[in-house]
Every structure is written in C-alpha cells, then in structure tokens.
Image (cartoon, rainbow, N blue to C red):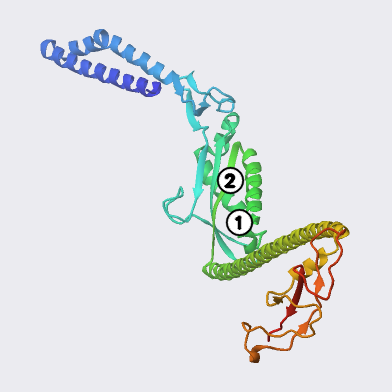
C-alpha cells in the first residue's frame, strides 16, 4: 500500500475521532455543569492530548513521501533559492519539509504516443494521422508512434520547461512537424518503395536529437503506415496488376521452355539409349559373326586336316595296292548304275529280259572291263579276253 495514502487516511481518521469525541464530551458536560465549565474542560483538559496527536500525525504525513520505482519526484521548495531543488528525489521513502516543500511525481518508464487514422488506435479519438505532401505534390497520411521516456537526471529541467504538458506541447507538435518536413524530401513513389526505410531512419535521427536536447530519451520512432490518395492507389493497383500479368506470362513462358527442354532431353536420352542399344546389337552381331567365322574357319581347318589325313592314308594304301582307286571309283558311282558280268571283248551291251522295256531304255555307253584284283601287288593280272570271276563290267544307264 502507498505510504502517503496510508498516512493521509490515518491523519483523517485521527482528526475525525478527535473532533467527534470533543463534541460528545462538550455536549454531556454542558448538560451536567453548564456551558462555561464545558468549554473550559474541553479546551484545557480534554482536547490538548488528542489535538497534539493529530498535529504530530499530520506533520509526519506531510514529511514522508514514498516514490515508486518507475517514477521520480521534483521538489518545489520555499527554502530553495530558485524555489526548486536542484536534484530530483529518486524512488524510495524520502523526507521533505512539511508545508514548505511539495513533491511532483513524473514517470521515467517508456511511454508510447501514437497518432493514427483509426479512431480508437491512437491517443486521441478520431483520425489523428499526419497529413503531408510529397516532393511531387501528392498527399499522404502518416500513422506513427514514438517511444520515449524522461531522462531522470533532467527531470527538473523537464518540469521547469514543460511540467505535465510535455506530450501536448512538445512531443505531438514536433513529431507532426518533422514528419511533414522530411516527407517533402521524397516523391510519392519513393515513399512507397524501399526508400521508406530511409525515411524512417531519418525520422529516428531527427527526433532523437530533438528529444535528447530537451531532457528525453528516444527508443524508436515507428512509421506504422502510409496512406495514399484514392487516385494514386488506383494507379498503383493497375500497375501491380499489369506487373503480375507480366510476371505470370514470364512464368508461363519459362514453364513452357522448361517443358520443351525436358521433352527434348527426354527425346535425346531416348535416342541415345536407342543408339546405345543398336550399337550393342551391332557389336553383338559382329561378335557373333566373328565367332561364327572363327568356328567355321576352325571347322574347315579340322575338315581339311581330316581330309589331309584321309588322303595320306589313301596315298599310303595306294602305295601298297593301286587297285584301291578303282574300287573307290566304283563305290562312288550313282545308285542307278546297273552292274553285269560281260566278256571283255563284247562291243555292245544288250538289255536283259528283266530290265525295263525298250521305250524306257536310252542309249548306253560301255565301259571296258578292268581286272580288279583284291590280292596283293605281287599277283599278276588275268587275261583280258575271257572274263573271270574277278572280272567286273559296269554298265552305266542314264535315265531322264
């Protein structure tokens, strides 16, 4: 509980009790002993003690001041040469001279003052935005907030210069004036672009210098919102719509380009894959052909080697018995050959009764009977005139 309030309440209660008790005592004494005796008794005997107690409590109440931690006190003093103490009272329980000094409390916490076009958002009801004109003559409305506090070391100066009027007489008019001055250095397009940050920085620097020179600290100047005229807003919206359409067209074109590129890459990859497949197939076919050719060559070499070996065997056999060649000749004749035993000196070959009819028989050629001996080469040949059991005559008949 605030000590000042407590002492004030206590003093009031004491005085009420003293006065009530004095009136009651005066009334009862008057009825018993008369008026003169009642006045004497009340003034001389009964009221001295309670009155002294009330005076003491009142002096203590007026001498003690408790200052909250977030506040500071400026002392107005009758005993000071300038009528004010040079140093303010800091937070805590402080003593002052009763009836000769008075303490005025100022806050030293951060305060926010807002000016906005929304009726219930700012410190003042209604549209409290700052109307300013840009460099190119366009009208804009500025919503802003300023966060500041009193420098505790300069509280006496603030009291002397502004008292409790520092918001209405200093903060508000200075903010509005500086905002209008700095906005006039920018065009409306600059205010509506990234230049807004530059404007906010310039406002912070200007307000900080101004307030520090007058006993205040600035935490931040906040540029909350910038409103434009309806004509400019409509033109900006049209530009934005056109820009969005252009961006959308660019996105669409880029999408089409990426899609076409993707399809081209897909076709390219497919063609590359097909080419690789064909190349692999060609290599496989070439390999197969090479393998087949090598196999055929190897087979032919083996066949030639076999034939060579057979010829060598035949050559060796012929070297032993040359009649083997005639045997091989007869063995290789066509199956249509008719075989008969004929005399060696017969000039014609006559058809046998068991052979085909004369209309099926074509002219034939005769071959000379050659003696074939199956014996070894030491045996002599038989006479050629009369066929012997070992004499064989072949007749070749050719059919159409």
Comparing labels 1 and 2, the label whose residue is closer to the camera: 2
- Tell whether 369 sits left or right of 54: right
Tell me: residue 269, above or below residue 30.
below
Residue lying at 82% horizontally and 72% vertically, measured from the top left: 370
Q: Position of residue 301 (x, y in %)?
A: 81, 58
Q: Position of residue 315 (x, y in %)?
A: 86, 59
Q: Position of residue 57 (x, y in %)?
A: 36, 15
The total number of labels drawn is 2
Q: Residue furthest left?
A: 32
Q: Residue furthest bottom?
A: 359
Residue lying at 54% horizontally and 34% vertically, measured from the top left: 159
Q: Position of residue 290 (x, y in %)?
A: 77, 60
* Mark 1, residue position: 180
Give the label on residue 43, or none: none
The one nearer the camera, 308 or 16, is 308
The one nearer the camera, 13 or 136, is 136
Name the image quarter holding the C terminus.
bottom right
Q: Quadrant of residue 146?
A: top right
* Mark 2, residue position: 221
Q: Earlier in the sequence, mark 1 or mark 2?
A: 1
Tell me: residue 394, above or below residue 261.
below
The one nearer the camera, 292 or 356, is 356
Residue lying at 33% horizontally and 19% vertically, measured from the top left: 11
Badge 2 crowding class, 10 Å Cα cut-off, few under 14, some 14 to 19, many 20 or more, is: many
Q: Secondary structure at mark 2?
A: strand
Q: Are marks 1 and 2 in contact (CB under 8 Å)?
A: no
Badge 1 crowding class, 10 Å Cα cut-off, few under 14, some 14 to 19, many 20 or more, is: some
Residue lying at 16% horizontally and 15% vertically, measured from the top left: 35
Name the image quarter holding the N terminus.
top left
Q: Secondary structure at mark 1?
A: helix
The one nearer the camera, 126 or 284, is 284
> Quick check: can you spot residue 320?
yes
């Amino acid at each position: 509980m605030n000590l000042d309030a407590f002492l004030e309440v206590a003093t009031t209660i004491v005085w009420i009790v003293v006065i009530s008790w004095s009136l009651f005592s005066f009334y009862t004494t008057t009825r018993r002993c008369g008026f003169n005796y009642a006045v004497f008794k009340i003034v001389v005997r009964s009221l001295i003690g309670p009155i002294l107690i009330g005076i003491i409590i009142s002096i203590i109440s007026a001498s003690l001041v408790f200052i909250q931690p977030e506040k500071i006190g400026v002392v107005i003093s009758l005993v000071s040469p300038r009528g004010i103490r040079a140093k303010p009272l800091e937070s805590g329980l402080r003593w002052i001279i009763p009836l000769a000094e008075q303490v005025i409390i100022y806050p030293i916490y951060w305060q926010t003052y807002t000016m906005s076009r929304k009726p219930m958002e700012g410190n003042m009801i209604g549209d409290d935005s700052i109307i300013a004109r840009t460099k190119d003559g366009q009208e804009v409305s500025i919503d802003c907030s300023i966060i500041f506090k009193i420098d505790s070391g300069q509280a006496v100066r603030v009291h002397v210069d502004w008292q409790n009027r520092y918001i209405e007489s200093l903060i508000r008019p200075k903010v509005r004036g500086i905002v209008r001055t700095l906005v006039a250095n920018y065009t409306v397009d600059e205010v509506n672009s990234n230049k807004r940050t530059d404007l906010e920085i310039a406002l912070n620097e200007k307000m900080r210098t101004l307030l520090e020179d007058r006993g205040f600290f600035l935490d931040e100047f906040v540029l909350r919102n910038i409103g434009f005229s309806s004509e400019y807003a409509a033109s900006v919206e049209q530009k934005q719509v056109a820009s969005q359409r252009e961006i959308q067209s660019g996105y669409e074109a880029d999408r089409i380009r990426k899609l076409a590129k993707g399809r081209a890459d897909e076709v390219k990859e497919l063609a590359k894959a097909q080419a690789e497949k064909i190349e692999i197939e060609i290599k496989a076919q070439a390999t197969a052909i090479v393998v087949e050719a090598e196999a055929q060559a190897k087979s032919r070499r083996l066949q030639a080697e076999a034939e060579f070996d057979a010829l060598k065997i035949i050559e060796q056999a012929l070297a032993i018995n040359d009649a083997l060649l005639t045997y091989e000749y007869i063995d290789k004749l066509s199956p249509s050959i008719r075989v008969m035993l004929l005399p060696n000196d017969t000039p014609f070959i006559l058809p046998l009764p068991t052979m085909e009819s004369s209309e099926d028989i074509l002219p034939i050629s005769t071959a000379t009977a050659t003696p074939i001996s199956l014996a070894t080469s030491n045996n002599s040949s038989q006479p050629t005139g009369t066929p012997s059991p070992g004499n064989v005559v072949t007749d070749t008949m050719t059919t159409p």
